[in-house]
Image: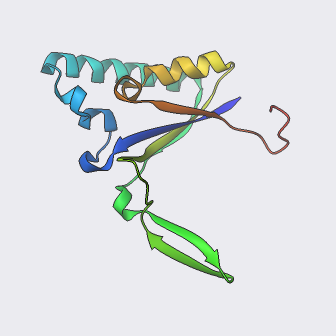
Amino acid sequence: MKYLYLIYGNAENWGHPIFMRHPEYLALPEEERTRIAEVADRQFREIEKTGELISGTALADPVLTRTTRPRDGVPVSTDGPYMESKEQLAGFFVFDCETPERADEIAAMFPEARFGAIEVHPIMDLSGQEM
C-alpha cells in the first residue's frame, strides 16, 4: 500500500531539511547534530535502495502559497494558507510499504518525527478497495 507522509515546519525559520531549523535540534551539541544528520542521510539512502520511496519534495515558503476557490464559475485566488497554527506543510513523501507497521517504522526514521510529527496517510487507489 502507498502512504503519504506529510511533514510540517514553522514558517518563521523556513528551510530544508526542516529539522535542521528546529530550536530543539539547534540546541543540541554540534556533534549530536552532525550524528543525527548523518544517520538520517544514511537511512534515507537505504530506504531509496529498497524501492519503497515513490516520490517526495520540499515545498517553498508558505508566503508563496495561494488558495483558490471557484466562485460563480470563476477561480478566486488569495495569498497563503491562512492557518491558525505556526506549523505549515513543508513537504511530502510517498512510500510503498508492505504493512502499516513498516510505514510507521519509516516515518520514525525522519528526524522531523523526533522534533515534531510525521502524518502518515494511506493512499487509496482508484478502486478504493483497500479501505
Q: Toward the viewer: 81 or 99? A: 81
Q: How many marks?
A: 0
Q: Where 103 falls versus 86 (above or below)?
A: above
Residue 40: image location, x then y, percent? 36, 22
- State the residue at coordinates (14%, 21%): 30
Residue 68: image quadrant is bottom right
Instruction: Describe residue 104's horizontal placement relative to residue 73 as left or right.
Output: left
| Colouring method of the image | rainbow
Quadrant showing the N terminus? top right
Residue 18: image location, x then y, percent? 33, 38
Instruction: Describe residue 105's horizontal placement relative to residue 97 as left or right.
Output: left
- State the residue at coordinates (25%, 16%): 35
Instruction: Describe residue 130's horizontal placement relative to residue 73 as left or right.
Output: right
Residue 60: image quadrant is bottom left
Q: Where 43 falls versus 75 (above or below)?
A: above
Quadrant showing the C terminus? top right
Residue 98: image location, x then y, percent? 69, 19
Instruction: Describe residue 55's horizontal placement relative to residue 22 as left or right.
Output: right
The furthest residue to the front: 84
- State the residue at coordinates (44%, 25%): 44
- State the residue at coordinates (16%, 25%): 27
